[in-house]
Amino acid sequence: MYRICIALVVGLLLATTCFAEEPRLKDQAEIAFVSTSGNSEVTTLAAKNTLTYAFSERFLVKWKLLALYSESDGETEAESYATQLRGDYLHTDRLYSYASVGWLKDRFAGLEARYTLIGGAGYKFLLGPKHFLAGEAGLTYTTEKLKDDADRGYLGGRLFGQYDYVFSETSRFSQSVEWLTDFDETENWLLISETALVTALNSHLSLKTSYVVNYDNLPADDFDETDTVLGVTLVVNF
């Protein structure tokens, strides 16, 4: 399985290289790969790719792809895949609206598939140059298929906030928190937090250290509420 993931990442890098001449097109790839052998055989792959295209100064579209796979001594310990397509329209320098559609599969969280449709608005409270702060609110519609063959669909809400602090031209800290809730069953909610420090190595390469917490207040049967990922990744900007 991890060979498929590697092929996916290589394909993304080749595709973005072909598009590098387009001034409105930007791409950011994050890659982390570890493989050990001998007394302990461990393989871990984490990859994230974000492709952004600006149709105009006010309207842009982002497409994200994510993959996480971990294997220890021949046994798979983590496996998740996700994709999201999102469009943003800037009404002013601070106010914007957005809509997105996404898919997630997380084998070790008991989630066969989750499809999410989101629409809402956001506001940029701080515009820099050192401090950046944005908040978003919206409505969601989610359908899920769990490992126990249970299916559910529900209308919900979304709150999101992200703070960035720029230490220098080469270093940046960010903290984001996303809360997703189910209007029908109030105990069914998700909380996703990411803390990250990014340091630029040159104009195209950066090193990112991040800690991600995924908390599911109503997980599938026999699965834990909390998943965490601590990672050090190479970020490639095109």
Image (cartoon, grey):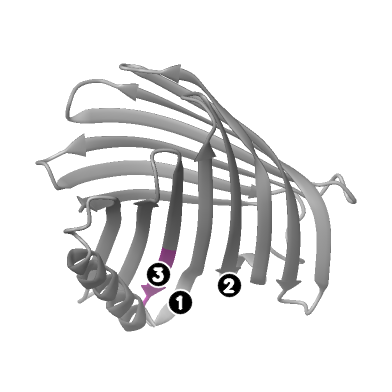
Residue on which the image places disc 1: 76
Please tell me whether residue 166 is drawn above or below residue 65 in the rendered image: above
Q: Amino acid at mark 3?
A: Ser
Residue on which the image places disc 2: 107
Classify mark 3: helix, strand or loop: strand
| Contact, mark 3 vs mark 1 (Cβ under 8 Å) | yes
Please tell me whether residue 59 is drawn above or below residue 84 in the rendered image: above
- Quadrant where the N terminus lies? bottom left
- Residue 124 on the magenta segment: no
Q: Is residue 205 left or right of residue 7?
A: left
- Numbered mark located on residue 70 in the image: 3
Please tell me whether residue 108 is drawn above or below residue 207 in the rendered image: below
- Numbered mark located on residue 225 in the image: none
- Residue 69 on the magenta segment: yes
**Quadrant of residue 207 within the rendered picture:** top left
Mark 1 packing: few (<14 Cα in 10 Å), some, or many (20+)?
some
Q: Say which residue appears at 17% left-offset and 38% top-offset.
A: 200
Of the pair 132 and 230, the residue shown nearer to us: 132
Classify mark 1: helix, strand or loop: strand
Say if residue 110 shows up in the picture.
Answer: no
> Which segment did they paint magenta?
66-73
| Contact, mark 1 vs mark 2 (Cβ under 8 Å) | yes
Q: Say which residue appears at 15% left-offset and 47% top-offset.
A: 205
- Locate residue 88, reporting x and y percent: 52, 44
Q: What is the spatial separation of the Cα atoms under label 1 and label 2, in whole angstroms?
A: 10 Å
Upstream in sequence: badge 3 or badge 1:
3
Say if residue 121 shows up in the picture.
Answer: yes
Farthest residue in the front direction?
56
